[in-house]
Amino acid sequence: MDDDQQLEEALGGGPATREAPGFVFLCCQVGAEAAVKAELQRRWSQLRFAFSRPGFLTYKLPANHGLFADFDLNIVFARCWGFSLGTVRASDTESPARDVWRVYGERPCRRMHVWQRDQHPAGEHDFEPSITPAAREAHAAIRKACPRPGELAAEAHNPVAPAQRGEMVLDCVLVEPDVWWVGYHRAWEPVSCWPGGIPPLRLPPHAASRAWLKTQEALSWSGLPMPRGARVVELGSAPGGSSQALLARGLEVVGIDPAAMHPSVLGEVGFTHLRRRVRQVRRREFRKARWLLADMNVTPNCTLDAVEAIIRYPMVHIRGMLLTLKLPEWSLAKEVPKYLQRIRAWGYNDVRARQLAHNRQEICVAALMKPFRRTPERGSPATDR
Ligand SMILES: C[S@@+](CC[C@H](N)C(=O)[O-])C[C@H]1O[C@@H](n2cnc3c(N)ncnc32)[C@H](O)[C@@H]1O
């Protein structure tokens, strides 16, 4: 698809809702900036780089871009994006919150999404993206200064509450403690409903591992239609946070891992542990499974080889998958289109990828076969991304 088609694809809607700000902002993990830039260069080459800080970038849009407020950049390494309107320097003003509204102008507004750009690379110092105390404080001040409070949604007082689909959202990114970047978007996909693209999750005390967070997020983001009672196999299941998230949704889980599962997971009804490496598992163990998760600490090609060996087996019928692909080197980011193409060639025609807020240096791929054919046509045409 060429660049003009990309823009056309993102237009949608009627002329009455066209918007004309000149810049967009994007947020990503610290360290993912080069991957974001490369994706934009490849897919949106009319955008011109303007400014960046770790985890935050802005780009100039072409004149007459015609994008709507719910535009989807459709790129893997950006966590969230929106139109950029300008900055407020908290040190230069007595009331930064009032200045935020001045920059925002007369646009309608139902919610305020306020967050800080990531302070550390994912996983460093146990860093987990969240709506920080500084962001909560700024959110409260901006809400208090709202010139038209009657327009706000009832839940707008809650800094982590997701927006409803279709709502206009004021975005305020704390790029530095005293430099606030103001923008907006219209909430549409699940990720654009979450403040800063971060789902409102908190690791529960009973979680066996932080993989609980990424599997919860992956399920919400992907919307894979896994019915209660369906069987899921998880490759790389120990110690078991991810299996817990699946079991809590009423799924039956077969965990495959040579390492020990947490005792609390082993005791759960609906969980079976095959304490082996994937290649030591007999293929018929996969026959009743319709869904597959993989979260092994191996290279992306090793994960894809292991998955391919399973799904190509004649008696195995996997309808959808959530695959974590580890990127031990950031240079592997440029290989992502090849990984996705390989998965499409297995007959999965809806393949999407995202670096989840709770992913570390890795991405999540969601793959679905629509409609589900027990014998997929290998190499059938597929949608992009
Ligand atoms: C990131 S951890 C998985 C975390 C897990 N999903 C959870 O919810 O706690 C990676 C796991 O992959 C497992 N692993 C690595 N190679 C494997 C293989 N060939 N077959 C099965 N498991 C493997 C490791 O033993 C390790 O437990």
Image: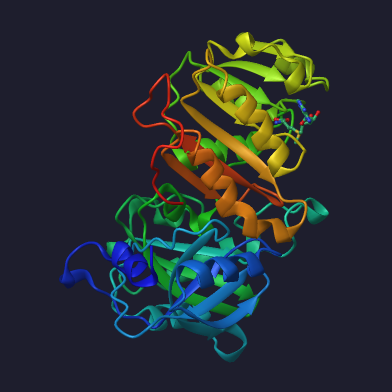
Residue 255: image location, x then y, percent: 68, 19
* Colouring chosen for the image of the structure: rainbow
- Find residue 52 and report its horizontal and vertical position in percent: 62, 78
Q: Is residue 117 left or right of residue 320?
A: right
Q: Using the image, determine if residue 300 lies above or below residue 47.
A: above
Q: Residue at x 40, y 37 (%)?
A: 380
In the image, taking residue 155 as reference, residue 51 lies left or right, namely right
For residue 143, which quarter of the picture?
bottom left
Which of the 4 image quadrants contains residue 117?
bottom right
Q: Nearer the viewer, residue 322 or 199?
A: 322
- Measured as percent of width and height from the top left, residue 228 is found at 45, 17
Residue 312 visible in the current orientation: yes
- In depth, the one of 74 and 344 nearer the eye is 344
Q: 235 or 92, which lies in front?
A: 235
Percent from the top left, x then y, of residue 161? 46, 49
Q: Is residue 12 above or below residue 234?
A: below
In the picture, the quarter occupied by the N terminus is bottom left
As drawn, the residue found furthest toward the bottom would be: 92
Q: Name which residue lies at 29% across and 55% down.
A: 166
**Count of labels shown?**
0
| Residue located 79% across and 50% down the image | 126
Left-right relation of 3 to 134: left
Query: Quick one: 128 or 350, which is closer to the camera?
Result: 350
Q: Is residue 204 visible?
A: no
The image quadrant where one finds ligand 1 is: top right
